[in-house]
Amino acid sequence: GLTVVSSSEGDRLLVACNLSDEVVIMDSSGNLLHRISLGNTPFVPSAYPYQVAANEKTAWVSLWNSSEVLQLDLEEGTILRRIPLLSPDKPTAAGSHPGAMLLANHRLYVALANADTIAVLQERTGKLLDLWSTRLPGQALPGANPTALSISEDGKTLFVADSNANAIAVL
């Protein structure tokens, strides 16, 4: 994933490099400003950074294999905090697979593709505020697979693409 971060100092590009377990921050001319290592094992790739979201000074990156989101300081090029999201009990168990993210209304919405869930985090602190199911009414078994997010103009309705269900969850 990638996103453009606009500020008074100019645009920066934030890129999730999934096969090297890094996020890179570049200026609008393509000059490398920061390279942030995200993995927490000796093996690469292990974390598999998937998507990024940002405001002017802070960014978030979803780590597909690590079942967590990292909050980054864009000025310093450092990790501020690791936020676990439905982490598996065993290292070999399947994780929640955080993927798509949306920053809106001082909240970070994170699609947990393997858990049929949207995690709602407080933007500033990273505190987990809620978990919302994206399963169809009456759906007992997993498999909705939320993969994309959008929010209504008034910020009151979240739309979630449930890829495997071929449906849109309206939350």
Image: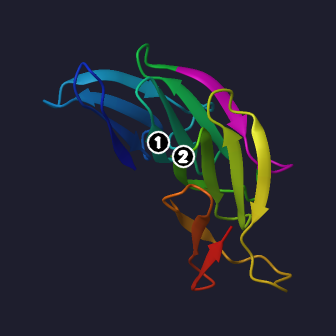
* Mark 2 neighbour density, 10 Å: few (under 14) some (14–19) many (20 or more): few
Tag 1 secondary structure: strand
- Count neighbours of disc 1 (C-alpha within 10 A) and say few if under 14, some if 14 to 19, many if 20 or more: many
Rendered residue at 75%/34% (across/down): 127
Quarter of the image for residue 112 reads bottom right
Vertical comparison of 97 with 40: above or below? below
Q: Amino acid at mark 1?
A: Ala
Res 48 visible: no
Residue positioned 54% across, 46% down in the render:
104
**Point 84% across, 49% down: residue:** 90
Element under label 2? strand
Can you see residue 18?
A: yes
Q: For the view shown, which residue lies furthest in the top direction?
A: 76
Viewer-closest of 121 and 68: 121
| Direction from residue 123 to residue 88 in the image, left or right | right
Could you tell me if the residues under marks 2 and 1 are in contact, i.e. CB atoms within 8 Å? no
Q: Amino acid at mark 2?
A: Ala
* Sequence-wise first label, 2 or 1: 1
Closer to viewer: mark 2 or mark 1: 2
**Residue indicated by mark 2:** 104
Residue highlighted by disc 1: 53
Find out whether residue 115 is within the magenta segment.
no
Residue at (36, 40) in percent of width and height: 15
Estimate the x, y position of residue 145 in percent, counting from the top left. 64, 72
Front-most of residues 105 and 38: 105
Span colored in magenta:
79-91
Residue 24 position in % (x across, y down): 35, 31
